[in-house]
Amino acid sequence: MSVRRLVIAAALAAALAPTALAAEPFKVSLDQTVSLALSHPAASVALGNATVADVTVSDANTLLITGKAFGTTNLLVMDRNGQTILQTQLVVAADNVGQLTIYRGNGTNTYSCVEKCRPAPVVGDAADFYSNTMGTIQSKAATAAGGKQ
């Protein structure tokens, strides 16, 4: 977890009161999970758009937030008395560390360049690049699971 995410999570956790409204959006990187500590036990959690992010309740005081697609949604957490514990905007953005994006005409091709650049498609990449790469990934997963290629 980056220092920035830790600082954001700590600031949110420190500022949370039974009727807390977060002024700054909570930022999560695409395809990453961040832990969010609550100051009070949560009884219900509502997420505005489940295609943008996913929230899992780890325990009554801890949420796990995963960025699923680029975009913005909102998160509402309430206690057992129906009081708002947290209300904030969630922003899912790219974590560009070790990432290369090649622009070709109107499309993009994204690569992960940790040791060597390899295709790592993200939502918004050119349809043929995305489909071809995902097909290769799914074929490899099926082979590993004992299926046919």
Image (tube, rainbow, N blue to C red):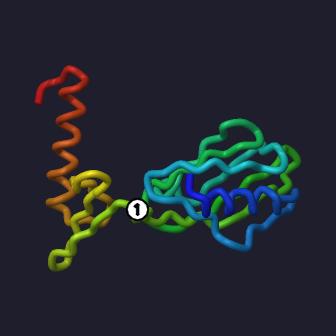
Q: Residue furthest front?
A: 115
Specify the quadrant of the image occupied by residue 62.
Answer: top right
21 left or right of 58?
right
Residue under the image location 64 percent in, 48 percent down: 35
Rendered view: 93 above or below 55: below
- What quarter of the picture does the C terminus occupy? top left
Identify the amino acid type marked 1. Answer: Val
Along the line of sight, which residue is nearer the eye, 68 or 95?
A: 95
Secondary structure state at the residue bearing disc 1? loop
Residue under the image location 74 percent in, 57 percent down: 10
Specify the quadrant of the image occupied by residue 73.
Answer: bottom right
Q: Residue furthest bottom?
A: 105
Residue 29 location in percent, x, y? 49, 59
Residue 36 location in percent, x, y? 68, 50
Total tally of numbered discs in the picture: 1
Residue under the image location 35 percent in, 60 percent down: 98
Rendered view: 64 above or below 58: below
Residue under the image location 73 percent in, 73 percent down: 23
Which residue in the structure is indicated by mark 1?
A: 97
135 left or right of 98?
left
Specify the quadrant of the image occupied by residue 85.
Answer: bottom right
Residue 103 location in percent, x, y? 21, 75
Rendered view: 86 above or below 140: below
Along the line of sight, which residue is nearer the eye, 117 or 66?
A: 117
Along the line of sight, which residue is nearer the eye, 143 or 81?
A: 143
